[in-house]
Amino acid sequence: MLSYKESLKILRETNALLEGHFILSSGLHSSRYVQCAKLLSNPKKAEIICSSLCEKIKNAFKTIDIILSPAIGGIVVGYEIGRQMSLETIFAERIDTKLILRRGFDIPKNSKVLIVEDVITTGKSAMECSELIKKNNSQLVGYACIIDRSNENLIIKDKIISQLKLEIDTFKENELPSALKNIEAIKPGSRNLSK
């Protein structure tokens, strides 16, 4: 199993964890920015991180029948965890602001389902997935992610298995610490970039 330090090193090497001055999609400012897509675009390093996460998942949960991930961020990590654990993996897609199962995906009745995400911040998508599990008369086993950066924002009350727990402070524009005031702010992320 990878140590916290080894995991952090891989995130930095793949630019999945950036440091500087960032304006988040919420409008808040931060000195750190997480973009797991950068890690997942590097299959060998993603495999190493996910292998370590698989060990943690196996230690935490006895039986898992199926993995469910929210699109789009959870698809690749869900697939990789499923591949390594030889489990069926499906994903939910957002249509008109609601996560649903499409593409012929279903959750067989009485299945034990693990929700897998890349990053959990508020837990909103993961909680929506848990509602799909209930609706399909199945059991939520738990939650797993590469990065848990939930801090106090979390709506999930169950334990989350993560490869890394990161505390990332955020600030309103009028409350920036002096260290951030001296660095030009950039807007990273899928909601902010046109490329």
Image: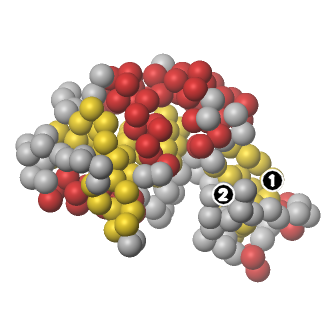
Q: Which residue was labeled with disc 2?
A: 189
Numbered disc 1: secondary structure: strand
- Quadrant housing residue 110: top left
Tag shown at residue 20:
1
Q: From the viewer's perspective, is 46 left or right of 156?
A: right
The amino acid type found where label 2 is placed reads Gly
Q: Position of residue 76 (x, y in %)?
A: 47, 38
Q: Identify the residue shown where x is 20% and y is 47%.
A: 106
- Is residue 5 in view? no
Q: Which quadrant would the C terminus be assigned to in this image? A: bottom right
- Quadrant housing residue 173: bottom right
The amino acid type found where label 1 is placed reads Gly
Q: Residue 171 versus residue 140: which sits nearer the camera?
A: 140
- Is residue 54 in view? yes
Q: Is residue 140 above or below residue 59?
A: below
Q: Position of residue 103 (x, y in %)?
A: 29, 49
Q: Residue 3 versus residue 77: which sits nearer the camera?
A: 77
Q: CA distance from mark 1 to mark 2?
A: 14 Å
Q: From the viewer's perspective, is 36 left or right of 21?
A: left
Disc 1 or disc 2, which is closer to the eye?
2
> Mark 2 or mark 1, which is nearer the start of the sequence?
1
Q: Identify the residue shown where x is 49% and y is 34%.
A: 163
